[in-house]
Amino acid sequence: MPSLQDVVDLVHGWYPPATADSWDRVGLVYGDPEQQVRRVLLAVDPTPEVATEAADVKADLLLVHHPLFLKGVHGFAATTPKGRTLRTLARADCALLTAHTNADQAAGGVSEAFAVALGLKELAPIVPAAAEPLDKLTVFVPADAAAPVRAAVAEAGAGQIGDYDYASFTSAPGEGRFRPLDGASPMIGAVGELTTVEEVRIEVVVPRGRREAVVRAMLGAHPYEEPAYDVVELADPGLASTGTGRIGVVEPTTLAGFAESVAAALPATHHGVRVAGDPERPVRRVAVCGGAGDFLLDRIATSDADVYVTSDLRHHPAAEFLEKGGPALVDVAHWAAEWTWLPVLEQRLREALGDAVETRVSALATDPWTMRL
């Protein structure tokens, strides 16, 4: 049976907290990292009602999307709804873990799950996440000293590509030439004499933040007094699979037909599905953003999308967007859009933890709107 820390590490591996927005508050909110986890309840909002459900099903962990405490507090007395939520969880010995904006952008995260639920294929981020800045270190070294140099730079943090480490390339031997001058202490050759040495070329990628450490490690392992090397900054190739929102394609349809499919794909709410645009407009390319997405309107206006699906669109920004003659708009309930992530997360937990942990998606609709006339 996994510990709470095991589950936290798993979730943070999928949705790294470092990728959350600076204003956000994600991670473990309450719980003993050493406690065992047998049941996990998944929900969008940590409301008092959801906390009660977690207690009723004897969950050891409530894993939610929205933070309980987004702003700093000096206390959490049960006289407030947030205080009551935490008290209910504490009495039930149920931990609380939040994955918010770190889950929004991730592969397998909120916007991607939303896009897949709506039938989008060939997905790409609307705004790709910036890749970690990389350098490439190239160094020339005698063939018999290549292995120690490769090992040294790898131990210092170079040569990691995705799920692989110790990655490097060594080219066929060539000839290195040099003449030691007065004051030199050459390992090979003599002062004043031109020397030729069989050398190999080693190339390795380096996270820019590890540049100095890797170069120092290379210099420390290299047999030469003055090694020949260069460091080149690499351009971002723009192939990120993570980032804000998603854009993809659906089978050709009309705006009205697409809106009907959106309504069928999402859990029912009183908010329903609002549509702005010509019902007969052809729809093929679709952009989506889970949660409140009007901050992307300017970018969407210049995209090749036929329609943009998101939540919480306001009157003036939406009206001004439509006046520009760009994509149509589909506005859905915030809770409903983000709920589509929960079954995806549940499946990931089941695949990773097997029968050791029981999972459950909350059936409570926490969308705030309860009536529409």
Image (cartoon, rainbow, N blue to C red):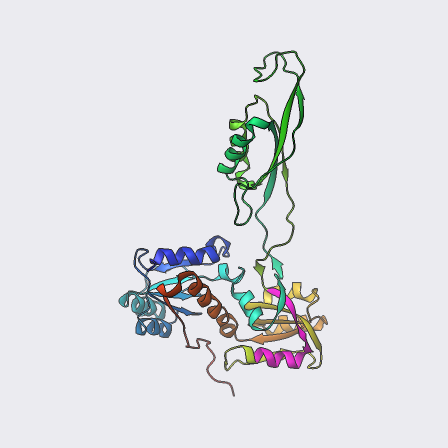
- Relative image position of residue 194 (x, y in whole percent): 67, 15
- Relative image position of residue 136 (x, y in whole percent): 61, 39
* Residue found at x 32% / y 70%: 84
* Residue found at x 59% / y 28%: 143
Residue 327, by quadrant, is bottom right
Q: Which residues are magenta?
A: 246-263
- Residue 69 seen in the figure: no
In the image, 239 versus 93, the foreground residue is 239
* Magenta segment includes 357: no
Q: Residue furthest bottom?
A: 373
* Magenta segment includes 250: yes
* Residue found at x 42% / y 57%: 10
In the displayed structure, 194 sits above or below 13; it is: above
In the displayed structure, 64 sits above or below 258; it is: above
In the image, 372 versus 168, the foreground residue is 168
Q: Is residue 244 left or right of residue 79?
A: right
Residue 202, by quadrant, is top right
- Relative image position of residue 198 (x, y in whole percent): 64, 24
Q: Residue furthest left?
A: 91
Q: Is residue 79 left or right of residue 116?
A: left
Q: Quadrant of the N terminus?
A: bottom left
